Amino acid sequence: MNTVIRVEGLNKSFGGKQVLFNMGLAVQPGEMVALIGASGSGKSTLLRHLSGLACGDRRDAGSIEILGRQVQAAGRLNRRVRRLRADIGYIFQQFNLVGRLSVMSNVLLGCLGRVPRWRGCLGWFTSEEKASAMAALERVGLAEYAHRRASTLSGGQQQRVAIARALTQGAQVILADEPIASLDPESARKVMEILADINGKDGKTVVVTLHQVDYAVRYCRRVVALKAGHIHFDGSVDALNGVFLNDLYGGDLDASL
Ligand code: ADP
Ligand code: MG
């Protein structure tokens, strides 16, 4: 299979301030890549552009190709964009569940990009879709919470529901922006293990931004480090060392551990 994510010459500024500089990145099928870097280095901006979620937030230059398809810079929400988005699962730091809906309904929302719009509007799902949502909940260890209101779950559980939603969506690529930043260490470990599991067992391509370097080292083989909008390092985690990391975090390495 071909390269899953290909970025070339990506530049982005906000109001005259450039935040991404001539970025190039290629991610192969089945890779799990950690995107690290100090706060403000451009991780979220890069990830948002990869997802096609950066609607109305045009890049200044460059091309982005996901699964062999161009992500349009203009970002108009047409059928092509919807279909591409259905192949990309996006995990947010704050989970983005609909709190008043059940866990099951939240997971079924993953189907919306693929079912006819009228069915989505009516909340009408087939028994296959429901079975697949339940299987995804089992996968993340939350089947028994299916009928609970999403807002009653802990942060770590809500993040696992968000992953189940991406699985039900049938996403081939998972982009996760600081998925563990709001979680306690035990919940963070569980979320990272699930991401590593769907990468290892299902061969999903995962790009995950992490503020904490130790999680990147533990769960990812490849690390891409951003510094002030530039790709400062792209290679094996084994090549990371304390001197490099201290430089990356501007001498504030402790904050990242
Ligand atoms: P990170 O995720 O690594 O913390 P971000 O991608 O969020 O970094 O931000 C990179 C830079 O872009 C920061 O200087 C931030 O202030 C700026 N930035 C991000 N989003 C916007 C926006 N919507 N409008 C203006 N500036 C932004
Ligand atoms: Mg960020």
Image (cartoon, rainbow, N blue to C red):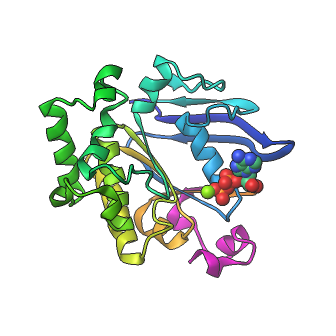
Query: In the shown orientation, is residue 206 left or right of residue 227?
Result: left
Which picture quadrant has residue 125?
A: top left
User: Where's residue 196, x and y in %?
Assistant: 34, 57
- Give the magenta part as a residue range: 231-257
Q: Residue at x 27, y 51 (%)?
A: 102
User: Where's residue 147, x and y in %?
Assistant: 19, 53
Which picture quadrant has residue 232?
A: bottom right
Q: Is residue 203 visible?
A: no
Number of numbered callouts drawn? 0
Q: Is residue 163 visible?
A: yes
Is the residue 139 above or below the residue 51 in the image?
below
Quarter of the render that holds ligand 2: bottom right
Q: Residue at x 63, y 78 (%)?
A: 255
User: Where's residue 161, x and y in %?
Assistant: 31, 54
Q: Is residue 245 magenta?
A: yes
* Residue that sits furthest to the bottom in the current view: 254
User: Where's residue 137, x and y in %?
Assistant: 22, 52
The quadrant the N terminus occupies is top left
Which of the pair 24/184 is nearer the observer?
Answer: 184
